[in-house]
Amino acid sequence: MTRHTINKFACLLVAILALGLPLVIRSATYLHILILLYFYAYLTSSWNLVGGFAGVLPLGHAAFVGIGAYASTILYLQYGVSPWLGMIMGGVLATIVGILIGLPTFKMRGAYFALATIAFAEGIRVMIENIDKLGPFVINGPRGLQIPPLKLGLGNFMFASKEPYYYIILIMLVAVLLITYSISRSKLGYYLNAGGEEPEAAMALGVNVARAKLIAMAMSSFLTALAGTFYAQFTLYIHPKSVISLDLSFEIAFIALIGGRGSIAGPVLGALLLRPVSDFSRIYFGDTLPGLHLIIFGVVLILVMLYQPRGLQEPLTRLYNKLVDRLVGGKVGEAQNEYS
Amino acid sequence: MNILEIKDLYKDFGGLRALNDLSLSIEQGQIFGLIGPNGAGKSTAFNCIAGVYAPSGGEIYFNGEQINGERPWNLCKKGLARTFQIVKPFATKTVLYNVMVATFARTNNRSEAEQKAVEVLESLHFEKKKDLRAGNLTIADRKRLEIARALATEPKLLLLDEVMAGLRPSEVDEMVAIIKQLRTRGITIFVIEHIMRAIMALSDHVVVLHFGQKIAEGAPQQVASDERVIKAYLGDEYVISAG
């Protein structure tokens, strides 16, 4: 067996597992947990385009989730626009907002950028919480919007069971992973990485760092907003606290930092590790110790940053490569693939 | 036409004039040296030319085109490349990745960028280290990487900012050979250097800066025996006792 066939085999195994899980798991609760796991992996992968490749730390991505969720929901409730179309329109709106946020903030460094993005996202949340009607659009302030599950079907992005949602978010996740993979190997990916690591050197080598970051921000906010629409259609009820909260922004960053920002597999690994913690702590300690999962995240984050500052994807990739080496037959130390 | 023409360039940082009325012109194909004691304004001059600082006054012409205040990435596309005195590798990436960032300045195609990067590395006898992480390189190799990256943008004029500082004598000789080889490819070279042996061996023409001011100019030997230059480097007493 060669390394290549083993990699292919592993991919096939993961694919079969992902596709077949809903057939095995009959419990709606577990399926729900899995769907949210993919949802967070998707969100973090979208975030990764800016937060990982471009080397900055945006902490306001919930704003784009909210924009996507509200845009498609308002369009559906008031104008009967299919959520699929609303999804795209929400994405476009989020892109515009993303560029407007990026233009002034990408000149800032480190913590200042993070703080500015928090401020923007919170601003949008507070606005939505306090507006009942924005022109012709009913927003309903803190009460949020409910989508009556009357017209089920693919066209209306509404289903009675969880399985369709599972496959939709799975497709979205695979798509975003393919996008990040191809970007990481493109000129843009090289420019983002270079600009994130040594902006001055990158500029001298012909990289317009600010422009590369803006392009990444535009793509990231577009993709993030799509997930907002998915969430709205999945839960059929959105309110500012659920889709634009700081908690959501922070959880994305937690997953990315622990999984490994700037890598393809990092966001997925992070979600795989952290989402179950968050869900089960909510199930078992939701009444007695609400917010326990955030404390656990914090502790895990500190440990990871101390011992694996590049995230858990690095040791896990190394482990995987070693395993493959063992299978291939002891040819240790061959070219390591960072994106297994 | 001169490839680089600087007229009455000056740069102020607050109340400090770091560079004062600097004028010089570099001919196509020259190796042009810029020397001076620490704090003389050499790197400031480079940063003004390379677009990192906007000059406070004066004019800079590159190939006859005025480039005052032009941004670094545009200058790179025009054919002006530079290295940094304090090396700035993309430390978590491989040597090849580092150079590919630079070759992407001339192509959008990944495989073409990779192929060009390998060619550049081969021309510097550096291709064996292409898969090493840049952060793990020795200082000599980091300096070489700086040159490889700058070279990979296919420059007409290359600004080298102290690429030999911190190198062992044998490594200095290697670097001198590399720079001479660059000239044979038709690249004009503007070099800041502290190591006199190297600058004397390399340069066709030398300008000496002191406190932001040009105090001497000419062929290397001529400049080295200039009284003002000796004063600037060693102090007044040395000139008196020597004279």
Image (cartoon, coloured by chain):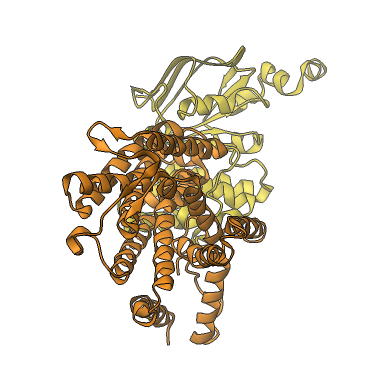
Chain colours: A orange, B yellow
Quarter of the image that includes the C terminus of chain A: bottom left
A48 w.r.t. A35: above or below? above
Does residue B109 appear in the picture of this structure? yes
The x and y percentages for residue A154 are 20, 64
B5 w.r.t. A201: above or below? above
In terms of depth relative to the viewer, which is nearer, A146 or B178?
A146
Q: Is residue B166 left or right of residue A213?
A: right
The x and y percentages for residue B51 are 45, 28
Look at 46% across and 55% down and name the residue there: B97
Quarter of the image that includes the N terminus of chain A: bottom left
Does residue B181 appear in the picture of this structure? no
B227 w.r.t. A319: above or below? above
Look at 17% across and 60% down and name the residue there: A155
In terms of depth relative to the viewer, which is nearer, A315 or A134?
A134
User: Image quarter for residue B242?
Assistant: top right
User: Image quarter for residue A2?
Assistant: bottom left
The x and y percentages for residue A321 are 52, 75
Q: Is residue A272 left or right of residue B35?
A: left
In terms of depth relative to the viewer, which is nearer, B86 or A218?
A218
Look at 35% across and 27% down and name the residue there: B63
In terms of depth relative to the viewer, which is nearer, A290 or B122?
A290
Look at 38% across and 82% down and name the residue there: A24
The x and y percentages for residue A79 are 17, 45
Q: What count of labels does the image hold? A: 0
